[in-house]
Amino acid sequence: MKKKIAFIGAGSFGFTRVLARDILTFDALKDCEIALMDIDPERLDYIKQAVEKIVKQGNYPATVSATTDRKKALEGADGVLITILAGGVDVWRHDIEIPKKYGVDINVGDTRGPAGVFRYLRTAPVMLDIARDIEKYAPNAIVLNYTNPMAMLCRTLQSETKINVTGLCHSVQGTAWMLSNWLGADINKEVTYLCAGINHLSYYLEYKVNGEDAYLKLRKILTENKKIYDEEIVRNEMFLHLDYYITESSGHNSEYNPWFRKRKELIEKYCHPGTGWNPGYYAYIRDEYLARENTWRDDIKKELNEENVDLKRGGEYAAYIFNACFGDYTPFQFNGNVQNFGLISNLPEKCCVEVPVFACREGLRPVHVGALPEHLSILVNTSAVCEELAVEGFLESNRRKIFYSLLHDPLTSAVCSMQEISDMTDEMFAANEEWLTI
């Protein structure tokens, strides 16, 4: 039967266009209904045009609908993709700018720490509303979340609702591909890996080329090739000292630990522009959004006017998962964000972990990993517990637990006193008051 896939937050132009393109490349899904939903009619119209262009150029028998009515988009959906943003840059810039006053230098601020926690507090109520609608209008749907902060949002949805949801982050497959290039290996034929941890703090516990451990060769490359070392200076330093490679980019990862952003000279050494795709300098993403505020329409129109559309399937997981669960049922393994019920034995029970997951006709099946190496679990545990405190603070309307979460954040605690963190937390609550439910 013809399948229906709903995009909630479809105005995320780049994501929606890529994911819709990938979905249509599968024979079992090429005649699906793509239901686009966004609260911004202008962005919705642009993405409808883009997806219709893909359908036309690919000569697919699919249909495309667009609506601002979430319930209409969700009704009867087999798959749901969530790519929302609660509030524009005028709102979330305070997540970055207020901590800076207290010495907390943030690069992106969408995952954890002061900026990530307050983004979570604004986004969680909206996500729960979406989940309640899914429970009512698409109770059997496979739900894939791309919205950050990934771990805290997935933990909330998985514990508080009945929807079948996991969270996806392209950092796992993206980093695996990057390492394969450095190692001169074919990612599709020669590389195997086991990756686990929490979102943006997952490690390749195994990374093999043709069945052999590739870490010794990788260490040699990073110590002898300065150009490659400089591409991802923060996480290359982390690998050289921790002996396992981490998934998320250097700019992001410099926020999640106490080693790179606590002093000016360290920031200048490790977080300067030009290191990898995500320069580590302060407020990188804020500046990117501000730079596009008056040009995004022109950028989209330019893309819409391009004669040809790239119809080749990309590397995002979503289409493969949908195909495995309700397409042609070809099983697919990926790394997803799920609750920890014994999957990683030395991380908190029920916290959100990122582990291998099998998608198949029976749904989503997470894989037991066991224990992380103890020296890795220290940092991962700290962030996981801080995330748990933030989730509990939201669910219990307990602002004190939000403060505790920030108090123990690795970067924040490396640069601030307890009183400074308390003052910062109060100031961030005040700045976000109209967006919060606690």
Image (cartoon, grey):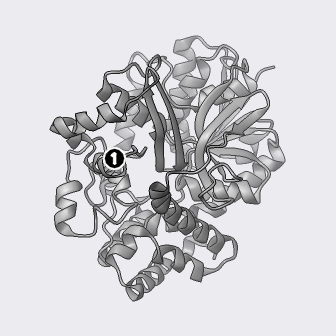
Residue 37 rendering spot, x and y as whole percentages: 63, 42
For the N terminus, which image quadrant?
A: top right
Visible in this render: residue 193?
yes
Q: Quadrant of the C terminus?
A: bottom right
* Residue at far bottom of view: 419
Residue closest to the eye, 97 or 165:
165
Residue furthest out toward the top: 59
The spot of residue 300 in percent (x, y) is 40, 35
Compared to 328, does 364 lie above or below?
Answer: below
Residue carrying label 1: 239
Going by the image, does 1 lie left or right of 232? right
Q: Nearer the viewer, residue 25 or 357?
A: 357
For mark 1, give the secondary structure.
helix
Q: Quadrant of residue 22?
A: top right
Residue 33 can be seen in this image? no
- Residue drawn 49% across the image and 51% down it: 373
Instruction: Name which residue lies at 31% across and 26% down.
Output: 183
Q: Position of residue 226 (x, y in %)?
A: 16, 39
The amino acid type, in three-letter code, at marker 1 is Phe
371 sits to left or right of 77: left
Image quarter for residue 350? bottom right
Place residue 348 in its image quadrant.
Answer: bottom right
Seen at 28% across and 38% down, the residue is 219
Classify mark 1: residues with Cα within 10 Å, few (<14), some (14-19) or many (20+). some
Above or below residue 399? Residue 161 is above
Which one is in front, 206 or 426? 206
